[in-house]
Image (tube, rainbow, N blue to C red):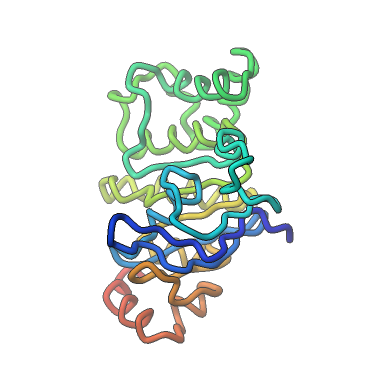
Amino acid sequence: METIIEIQHLSKTFGTNEVLRDIDFSVKKGEVVCIIGSSGSGKSTLLRCINLLEKPSGGRIIYRGEDILDEKHDIHAYRTKLGMVFQQFNLFNNYNVLGNCIVGQMKVLKRSREEATKVAMKYLKVVGMDQYINAKPRQLSGGQKQRVAIARALSMEPDVMLFDEPTSALDPEMVGEVLKVMKELAELGLTMLIVTHEMGFARDVADRVVFMDQGVIVEEGPPEQVLLNPVQERTREFLSRTLNQL
């Protein structure tokens, strides 16, 4: 399988606080990778470094064979290849559902309104929100907003989808509808990198689970190994605290 993103010796410091230390891992085409770990372990910072919302302090990010931290690289072009779904949806409140899904396509990808609408409708249908195209974000539930946010990211037709704890701001009864959509996307063969605390989802959907603690990768491997038969003591301790989810 083709490697889409490769992280080499990545580090990130905020002042004297070393948040990421010597991170190495890769994401292959069609792979679903779940990153787990306690709050403050560096998971979200890693995702934000990958899409350059944060500038790494050191190391390399290789995208399809090119180091995107190289000065010559076009960061904006790279960013269009990554779809990002945040905890807090980040929808544009002054646009309706359809507007949210076409504005980026038209501005960034220079698609016509007609083409952008066609693409948006395709993905709104995938997430089950095609009936709501005229609704404003304030009229939607949290789960619906997150599904629109997913459709908006998909409408840019990215190479990789990044999810930063996409269910953590949702009421419990809405978590399932978003995880169901994500599971369906995984079944479609989408390349996905997901920071999550949903252990059952990671077990059922991930090809690989990465456990982070205190800014380093402690353990990674297939879910049945990392979640059910971990090698490292730190992984076992973390899972003993969260295993009631499995």
The answer to whether 58 appears left or right of 236 in the picture is right
Pick out the residue farthest to the top.
113
Residue at image point 37% right, 67% down: 215
Q: Residue at x 51, y 35 (%)?
A: 153
Q: Is residue 156 or residue 203 the one in the foreground? A: 156
Where is residue 158 shown, x and y percent of the image? 60, 39
- Quadrant the N terminus occupies: bottom right
Which quarter shows the C terminus?
bottom left
**Residue shown at 35% from the left, 39% from the top:** 143
Q: Is residue 165 above or below residue 233?
A: above
**How many numbered discs sit on the rendered protein?**
0
Which one is nearer the viewer's eye here, 38 or 18? 18
Q: Quadrant of residue 237?
A: bottom left
Q: Please tell me which residue is depicted at 44% across the width and 48% down the height of the picture.
A: 55
Residue 21 in picture, x, y percent from top left: 42, 67
Along the horizontal axis of the image, is 133 left or right of 107?
left
**Residue 132 placement (x, y as % from top left):** 43, 23
Above or below — where is 91 with respect to 75?
Answer: above
Residue 229 image point, x, y percent: 46, 84
